[in-house]
Image (cartoon, rainbow, N blue to C red):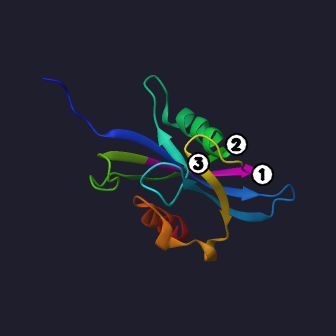
Amino acid sequence: MGIKTPFVAVDGIIQLFDRKDNFRGIVLIERKNPPLGLAIPGGFVEIGESCEDALIREMREETGLDVEILRLLGVYSQPDRDPRFHTVSITYLCRAYGEPMASSDAKEVKIFKLEEIPFDKLVFDHRRILRDYIMR
């Protein structure tokens, strides 16, 4: 009998700054694939890859940004958090500079001030994650 476990994913709340260290907002992506909507950038950890390396790779693939990991925000593991299958997300707080550009699973990349985040358009459990980030 094979062992069944949830998929492991990483998500990154990217705090975007300009070169003078002014906070521009956080980076969200418009998903290209279902479920459609806005999401925190992220993706799956590959075999042989650390969560931190996966996060840096996924942020670069989806937004074109090189991120600095600041700290772990939390682990999100509700079995129904992803409508496709049981996924555990390890979510990090990151810092980046530059202009994000959509690629990989991202149809579009957007920058939002915290007070402008459209919570009603977020997919998965990203409403909860962003509320945890704001309340930290």
- Earlier in the chain: of badge 1 and badge 3, it is 1
- Image: 46 above or below 24: above
Instruction: Write down the residue under mark 1.
Output: 99
Q: Is mark 1 in CB contact (under 8 Å) with mark 2?
A: yes
Instruction: Write down the residue under mark 2.
Output: 64
Residue 75: horizontal and vertical position, in percent?
40, 51
State whether the magenta stretch is mostly helix, strand or loop. strand
Judge the density around disc 2: few (<14), some (14-19), many (≥20) Cα neighbours within 10 Å.
some
Query: Rounded to the nearest whole Å, what is the CA distance between mark 1 and mark 3?
Result: 15 Å
Q: Write down the quadrant of residue 21 in the picture.
A: bottom right
Magenta-colored stretch includes residue 85:
no
- Earlier in the chain: of badge 2 and badge 3, it is 2
Residue 4: horizontal and vertical position, in percent?
22, 33
Q: Mark 2: which amino acid?
A: Gly
Q: Is mark 1 in CB contact (under 8 Å) with mark 3?
A: no
Dot 3: element: strand
Give 110 or 44, whichever is nearer the viewer: 110
Q: Which residues are the magenta region? A: 90-100
Q: Which part of the image, by quadrant, shows the N terminus?
A: top left
Give 38 or 135, whichever is nearer the viewer: 38
- Image: 81 above or below 53: below
Query: Rounded to the nearest whole Å, what is the CA distance between mark 1 and mark 2?
Result: 8 Å
Query: Rounded to the nearest whole Å, what is the CA distance between mark 2 and mark 3?
Result: 11 Å
Q: Nearer the viewer, mark 2 or mark 3?
A: 3
Instruction: Write down the residue under mark 3.
Output: 106
Magenta-colored stretch includes residue 97:
yes
Please indicate whether residue 89 sits to the left or right of residue 86 in the image: right
